Amino acid sequence: MAQKISAAIPYLPDILICGEDGQTIAFVQVKNARVLSRDVALALYRDVIVESDAASAPYFLLLSQRLGFLWRQHEASPDTRSRHSGHVRRPKSFKRLEADADVAPAVEFAMDGVIHRYLPDLSGGEWLHGRELDFIVSQWLFSLATEQQSAVGEPEKALADAGFLAAIEGAVVTIEPSGDVPAARYAALAV
């Protein structure tokens, strides 16, 4: 009987936020599950942090249409922090990485206000498709990175308190295409 060989497919970010130097600041996953509780978010975080190079980013964001979670991760050392290259690059201490994956998010926030700013006519029961939410979230993150923020409302105040807004000031926000959508389509959406 032939042995079945399988390789884990690493998670790629839905959105990547990088500084002008190309260093990853935040790894962003957009999961538009109707029920995204703190426990489900933590389980998703564990999976992503172990199966991707997300651990090299100082911040990890998990966002849905209703909720968002921000993790402030340990500072990446120079040997683990790299430009995003599409391949998994794990820190030397994999056991430490697994332990870090059990950390609760630093900030949990409602996304309703963000969605309403970009889609004011969206009814409360209407659910966005994944790509629609990716685009809205990327526009919001781009605005946070490039425009002066007052950080008086939520979730911006909580993100500012966590140091996230200062960290992404002037950063580049990129929608990372998944295997099923051509990059040209994303480029067309961003225009």
Image: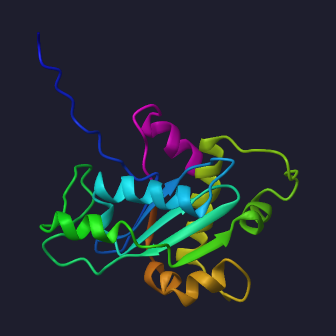
Where residue 8 appears, as percent x and y from the top left, is 26, 39
Residue 191 visible, this orientation: no
Seen in the picture, residue 4 relative to 182 is either above or below; the reply is above
Where residue 187 appears, as percent x and y from the top left, is 50, 45
Q: Quadrant of residue 117?
A: bottom right
Q: Quadrant of residue 156?
A: bottom right
Q: Nearer the viewer, residue 94 or 118?
A: 94
Q: Nearer the viewer, residue 11 or 131?
A: 11
Where residue 161 appears, as percent x and y from the top left, is 56, 90
Q: Is residue 181 magenta?
A: yes
Please provide the residue range marked out in magenta: 175-191
Q: Residue at x 66, y 87 (%)?
A: 151
Colour mapping used in the image: rainbow
Q: Residue at x 19, y 66 (%)?
A: 95
In the displayed structure image, the side of residue 182 where residue 97 appears, left or right: left
Q: Residue at x 29, y 56 (%)?
A: 50
Q: Is residue 186 magenta?
A: yes
Point out the image quarter for the N terminus.
top left
Seen in the picture, residue 181 relative to 18 is either above or below; the reply is above
Where residue 45 appears, as percent x and y from the top left, is 43, 59
Q: Residue at x 46, y 51 (%)?
A: 14
Q: Nearer the viewer, residue 86 or 139?
A: 86
In the displayed structure image, the side of residue 17 where residue 1 appears, left or right: left
Seen in the picture, residue 187 relative to 110 is either above or below; the reply is above
Residue 10 visible, this orientation: yes
Q: How many marks?
A: 0
In the displayed structure image, the side of residue 181 where residue 25 appears, left or right: left
In the displayed structure image, the side of residue 70 where residue 24 appears, left or right: left
